[in-house]
Image (cartoon, grey):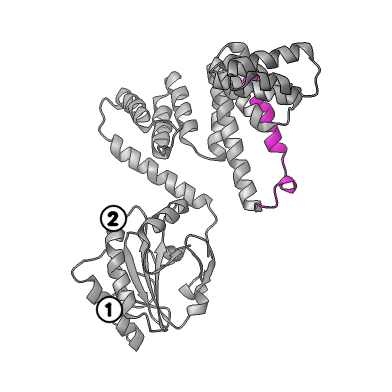
């Protein structure tokens, strides 16, 4: 076999020809898995997807537990089309799905946590059900496809499943269900490569909305309500951090972005100044340097602590934001403190006095007076005064 590879050099056509000749001469060679894999890669480079799919299937037959090559085989069979190929692809998808569903935490890598394993397993099941549903749609088995897309969406809502369910509902002339599903797909679409196009979803949604309502009137409001409903459902599904905490000192926040625990009980008795912000908030970006200047005024005072508490639902946005902006005050994740303090808009800056009571609150900010107002509020709190209009307790 090595001679066949060496003789081909960098010529992929020659490599395929030589390897196939080797297989014809030695059909039961122990090196078949390596040869099949090399033929799959070479044919993909030559853009011969039909031949690549053929050797990928042979490799799956030899190594049925090789998930990565099975997924590649499914993708190649789907691209080549043909009813027989699509049916085999659907069977492979079922095999991989069953493998994932049989997996147990005992089999996970020690490098990942139980939570990470569970989240990855959920994503895999969601993706595989959607993949099988797509194949079933191409096979015109709408009932099976609908069942798989519904199961996929129930595990983890996605724009892909919602859009497909919208198409199925539209085919059935169920305009109400089509509107609901397309609106969900539009709200969930994130613009990532390979995900559904929000522009195309908008066109589909607009079409069924006009068929049902006669015009686009009311569509914008419906989309906003759908987005809010999905956001609330997503938040409710996540475990609430610090759910039992009833005052700031009972909270354990996390430093951003690394997640190191930051218990507020360690700073109880100090004046706590918190800037609640989000990466998508323009005014938050404008406020940060002013907040940092006020914090600098108290840098040498051990009784005052300034924190910037991030409130993004998607915490993965925080690290690149911090890398680009490099704020001058300590950054933590809000982890429910925003819920306790009824933060409903950004930015919001709150001063909590030594007794854990709100001494000052600013919802939004006035650039011309923010710094002097916050300076005065912190000084009053340090002196033991609590004269803010917010009053005692946590109600704004």
Start-end of magenta stretch: 86-112
Rendered-image quadrant of the N terminus: top right
Q: Residue at x 62, y 28 (%)?
A: 71
Main SS, magenta region, reads helix
Residue that badge 2 annotates: 282
For residue 332, say whether it is visible.
yes
Helix, strand or loop at mark 1: helix
Residue 282 x/y as whole percent:
28, 55
Residue 244 x/y as whole percent:
54, 67
Q: Which residue lies furthest to the bottom in this view?
A: 383
**Label of residue 33 in the image:** none
Query: Which quarter of the figure has residue 64?
Result: top right
- 176 relative position to 99: left or right: left
Distance (Cα) linking label 2 and label 1: 23 Å
- 282 relative position to 55: left or right: left
Residue 188 x/y as whole percent:
43, 39
Looking at the image, tell me whether mark 2 or mark 1 is earlier in sequence order: 2
Task: Establish if 395 lies above or below 120.
Answer: below
Helix, strand or loop at mark 2: helix
Residue 230 x/y as whole percent:
44, 44
Crowding at label 1, few (<14), some or many (≥20) Cα neighbours within 10 Å?
some
Task: Establish if 323 lies above or below 142.
Answer: below
For residue 140, say whether it is visible.
no
Crowding at label 2, few (<14), some or many (≥20) Cα neighbours within 10 Å?
few
Residue that badge 1 annotates: 375
122 or 215: which is nearer to us?
122
Task: Establish if 188 lies above or below 8.
Answer: below
Query: Which quarter of the figure has residue 72?
Result: top right
- 189 relative position to 130: left or right: left
Q: Residue at x 41, y 64 (%)?
A: 309
Q: Based on the picture, tell me whether residue 89 belongs to the magenta stretch.
A: yes
Rendered-image quadrant of the C terminus: bottom left
């Amino acid at each position: 076999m090595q001679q066949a590879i060496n003789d081909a050099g960098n010529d992929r056509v020659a490599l395929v020809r030589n390897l196939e000749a080797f297989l014809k001469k030695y059909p039961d060679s122990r090196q078949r898995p390596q040869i099949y894999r090399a033929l799959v890669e070479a044919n993909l480079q030559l853009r011969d997807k039909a031949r690549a799919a053929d050797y990928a299937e042979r490799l799956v037959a030899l190594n049925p537990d090789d998930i990565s090559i099975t997924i590649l085989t499914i993708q190649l069979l789907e691209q080549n089309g043909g009813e027989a190929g699509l049916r085999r692809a659907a069977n492979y998808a079922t095999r991989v799905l069953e493998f994932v569903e049989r997996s147990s935490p005992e089999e996970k890598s020690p490098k990942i946590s139980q939570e990470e394993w569970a989240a990855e397993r959920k994503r895999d099941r969601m993706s595989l059900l959607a993949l099988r549903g797509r194949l079933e749609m191409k096979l015109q088995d709408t009932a099976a496809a609908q069942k798989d897309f519904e199961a996929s969406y129930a595990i983890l809502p996605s724009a892909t499943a919602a859009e497909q369910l919208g198409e199925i509902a539209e085919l059935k002339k169920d305009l109400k269900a089509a509107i609901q599903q397309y609106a969900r797909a539009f709200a969930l679409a994130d613009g990532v490569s390979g995900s559904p196009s929000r522009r195309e979803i908008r066109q589909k949604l607009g079409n069924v909305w006009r068929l049902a309502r006669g015009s686009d009137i009311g569509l914008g409001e419906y989309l906003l309500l759908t987005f809010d409903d999905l956001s609330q459902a997503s938040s409710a599904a996540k475990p609430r951090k610090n759910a039992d905490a009833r005052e700031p000192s009972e909270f354990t926040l996390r430093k951003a972005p690394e997640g190191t625990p930051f218990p507020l009980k360690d700073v109880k008795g100090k004046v706590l100044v918190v800037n609640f912000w989000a990466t998508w908030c323009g005014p938050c970006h404008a406020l940060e340097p002013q907040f940092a200047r006020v914090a600098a005024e108290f840098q040498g005072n051990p009784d005052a602590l300034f924190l910037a508490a991030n409130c993004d639902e998607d915490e993965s946005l925080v690290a690149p934001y911090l890398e680009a902006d490099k704020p001058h005050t300590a950054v933590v994740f809000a982890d429910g403190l925003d819920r306790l303090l009824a933060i409903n808009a950004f930015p919001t800056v709150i001063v909590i006095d030594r007794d854990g009571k709100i001494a000052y609150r600013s919802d939004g900010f006035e650039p011309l007076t923010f710094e002097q107002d916050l300076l005065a509020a912190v000084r009053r709190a340090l002196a033991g005064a609590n004269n803010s209009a917010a009053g005692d307790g946590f109600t704004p």
